Amino acid sequence: MPKVSLPSGLHHPRVTFMDCDGIIFDANGVKVAAFEKALADEPAGPRAELIAHHKQTGGISRYEKLRRFYTEMVPSDEPESAIAGALERFSQASVAGYRSLEPRPEALRFAEAMGGTEAVYVVSGSDGEELRQVFAEHDLLGCFADVLGSPTKKVPHMRRVLEERGLAPGDALMIGDGRGDLEACHALGVPFIFLREMSEWTDADAHLTPGDAVAPDWATVLDWL
């Protein structure tokens, strides 16, 4: 898909949703490493298959992916125990990985321009409690209205925010880099900007529609602002 200009009709959304990995933090590699750590004792083939699936389904939580692994791909006699252990290993690796990163300054400028604590919500497939810990360690909680994550999915989070604020989907905007972000926006009718710069979603062009905006990098988004 060629570069698409950001639509002028999105200049003043009343609420903005931002994904985290690949948007605020260049953390997609951290999550791949966390899956490697979580599944280190599992067969290499299924582990590689899950990681490949993960890269094409950004924005969908680790809970769903690890449950699929232990119930369908490598069925466990005690799936709940296996999932719990993998989740703990994943979380430890993920939090450690975030500590080595700094938030993208362009993302923080975007959040401030869109209303910051009054109107910008982080909505991520990452674990919500873990993500709030990461944002607190980076002194970022004061930059956003809220930081929302899994196990609650993106659609319920976004719908609740819209309902509580009395807004229609067209009053909002989301910027994300994964299929889960796009599908949540399409489900609700929220305008979407796909940020290609850090995305691992290689077949995005097959899923984006003419109504979706595409930005090759943060510089393009800030120029639009």
Image (cartoon, helix red, strand yellow):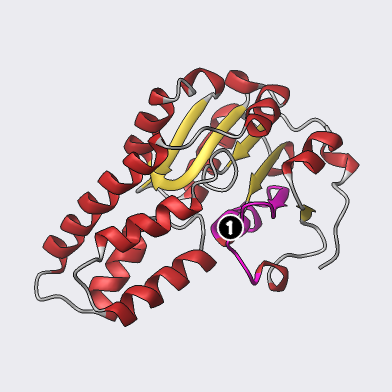
Q: Quadrant of residue 182?
A: bottom right
What kind of element bears circle 1? loop
Is 42 in front, or is 145?
42
Q: Label 1 belongs to which residue?
A: 178
Left or right of residue 98, residue 86 in this image: left
Q: Residue 198 location, x and y as percent?
A: 62, 52
Q: Residue 101 location, x and y as percent?
A: 47, 37
Left or right of residue 117, residue 194 in this image: right
Q: Residue 54 location, x and y as percent?
A: 45, 65
- Asked if residue 189 is among those painted magenta in the image, a careful observer would answer yes
Q: Look at the image and tell me in which quarter the C terminus lies.
A: top right
Bounds of the magenta segment: 180-203
Check disc 1 and give the amino acid type.
Answer: Gly
Is 16 in front, or is 214?
214
- Asked if residue 100 is among those painted magenta in the image, a careful observer would answer no
Q: Residue at x 23, y 72 (%)?
A: 70
